[in-house]
Amino acid sequence: MKSNFCLPAFALAAAFASACSPAAPPEAASLPAPVAQAPAPASAPAAAPSLVAEGSPAASPLPRLVVHKSPTCGCCSAWIKHVEKAGYPVEVVNGEDLNPLKLAIGVPAGKGSCHTAIVEGYFIEGHVPVEDVARLLAERPDARGLTVPGMPVGSPGMEVPSGEVQPYTVYLVNRDGSSTPFSQHGR
C-alpha cells in the first residue's frame, strides 16, 4: 500500500489501524540494511581544536538521526527543525512508502505516524519531543524505540497558533512488540 503520511489525523489513524533494569542499547546491525549505521572509519581524522574552556566538562556530540519521511510532508519538516534546534544532526531520507521500513523495524500496528527516525539502533516514530529522545538515549532501555501514534495537535511539528496541546502519550516499544507509557504531554 502506497502511503501519503501527510493526511488528516483521522485518515492516518485509519490507515495505521489496519496496517500496520538498564541494558546495553540494541545493536544497529539488528536493523535492516537501509537504516543500519555506517561502520566507524579505520582511522579517525585529527581532532579539531576544542572550543571548550579548560577545566569545564566537554559535551559529547549528539548522535545523528536518520529521518525517513515523505518529500512533501510539512509537519515532518517542522519536527526535524525541532530536533535540529536541540543540536541533533539530521539526515533526511525522502520516500513515498514508509510501511516496509516501519514493519521491518517493528513499529506496532496502530502506533505509527508520518515519519520514522533511526538513532543509535532505536526508532523514533512520529512527533516525539526531543527531551524524550534524549532520555531514551541516556537511559538506553532494551527496547525497539519510542512512538507517538497519530499526529497529536500541539506535539512538536504539529504546533498550532493558539498554543493548544492535545494530551498525548509517548510509548516505549519493547523488544517483544508490546508498549508501555514512557511520558505524558499536554496535561
Image: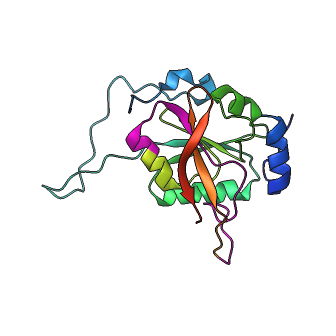
Query: Foreground residue, 30 or 139?
Result: 139
Find residue 180 and report its horizontal and vertical position in percent.
57, 40
> 2 above or below 176?
below
Quadrant in which the C terminus appears = bottom right
Q: Residue furthest left?
A: 55
Quadrant position of residue 164: bottom right
The residue located at (47%, 51%) in the rendering is: 88
Q: Is residue 118 magenta?
A: no
Q: Tell me if residue 51 can be seen.
A: yes
- Magenta highlight on residue 157: yes
- Give the camera-side residue of 144 and 57: 144
Q: Is residue 7 visible?
A: no
Q: Which residue occupies 56% across, 56% down? A: 184
Residue drawn at 83 percent across, 57 percent down: 8
Tell me where residue 77 appears, x and y as whole percent. Answer: 65, 56
Q: Position of residue 18 (x, y in %)?
A: 84, 36
* Residue found at x 81% / y 40%: 17
Q: Nearer the viewer, residue 51 or 185?
A: 185
Span highlighted in magenta in the image = 136-162
Q: Is residue 7 left or right of residue 59?
A: right
